[in-house]
Amino acid sequence: MATVARLSSIASVVITSTQNPRVKGLLALRRRPDRDREGLLLVEGHDELAVALASGARPVELYHCPALTRQPDAPELLARTAAAGAHLVEVSQPVFERVAYRQAPDGWLAVLPAVPTGLDHLRVPPGGAVLVCESVEKPGNLGAMLRTADAAGLDAVIACPAATDWGNPNVVRASKGALFTVPVAEAGHDELVAWLRERDLAVVIARPDAATPFTAADLTGGVALVVGAEHQGLSAAWSRAADAEVRIPMFGSVNSLNVAASAALLVYELLRQRGRLG
């Protein structure tokens, strides 16, 4: 991995120049082609890094800015990150503000290996539940759905097809670190449908014109909940693959909910039916 080699070849010093090669390497990882080529992603934020470490992730490097890392447990988090094998690099505030991609940065930016995204990495038990997202482009929506999946204990979230990569910094940010606690995957439609059939997961799709309210569908068995982007909805291919179609009733002037909000309603209805909300 060329980026790791470039970063690791430089002596561990305090970085004060925004022209430092390490800074250029970090900025390159904002771009998907560079992330894909290097097999790396960025995690910014104290809480996100803490969640990643707790899940067993092993950062390659951590860039921290003492002028911004004012959390009481900052020394502990630095020690935990180093114990996980990361190389610690201190940077000045101007440098950190250059490499940060969030407003009001808190002084933590880690480089981690990309998470696996093949279906072969997923383990879904009998009667399990997964969330499938078709062509969801906005990283914030993908991240929000990961947070919901984590909160609900879903077995996986699958992009089919993937319009945004799971390593997008804004997916990581919006997920609050749930990218490292919920297994994810990317797959083509035919491949995924075959995979779902092999695991006896019923395909339940959400459509605004479906006859069955989502609260009336049986979600107690193994299930794949399928949602699509607001502007185009689900493709006809998912209608052909569906075992059930459900709608979320709408009583106002708009005809659909944000996809992340729709997914949250479906997921928590699944939990209600399985008696897990009590």
Image (cartoon, rainbow, N blue to C red):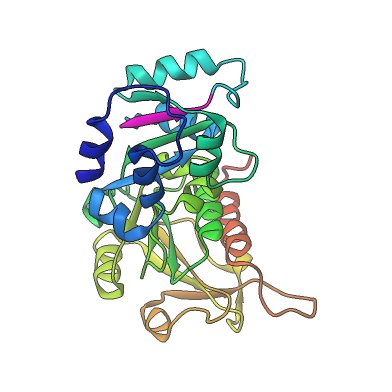
Residue 176, image x and y in percent?
Answer: 54, 41
Task: Decide if residue 228 is on the left or right side of residue 68.
Answer: left
**Closer to the camera in the image, 206 or 162:** 162
- Of all residues shown, which one is farthest toward the right? 252
Tell me which residue sits at (22%, 31%) in the image.
9
| Image quadrant where residue 83 sits | top left
**Closer to the camera in the image, 99 or 248:** 99
One can see residue 59 in this view: no
Residue 224, image x and y in percent?
Answer: 41, 62
Task: Decide if residue 66 is on the left or right side of residue 168.
Answer: right
| Image quadrant where residue 20 sits | top left
- Residue 138's place in the image compared with 168, above or below, is below
**Closer to the camera in the image, 226 or 71:** 71
Tell me which residue sits at (47%, 32%) in the image.
49
**Closer to the camera in the image, 154 or 15:** 15
Residue 203, image x and y in percent?
Answer: 40, 69
One can see residue 135 in this view: yes
Tell me which residue sits at (20%, 45%) in the image.
2
Tell me which residue sits at (41%, 42%) in the image.
19
Quadrant holding the N terminus: top left
> The magenta stretch spans which residues?
59-65
- Residue 246's place in the image compared with 8, above or below, is below
Quadrant holding the C terminus: top right
- Residue 135's place in the image compared with 102, above or below, is below
Task: Decide if residue 29 is on the left or right side of residue 228.
Answer: left
| Image quadrant where residue 159 sits | bottom left
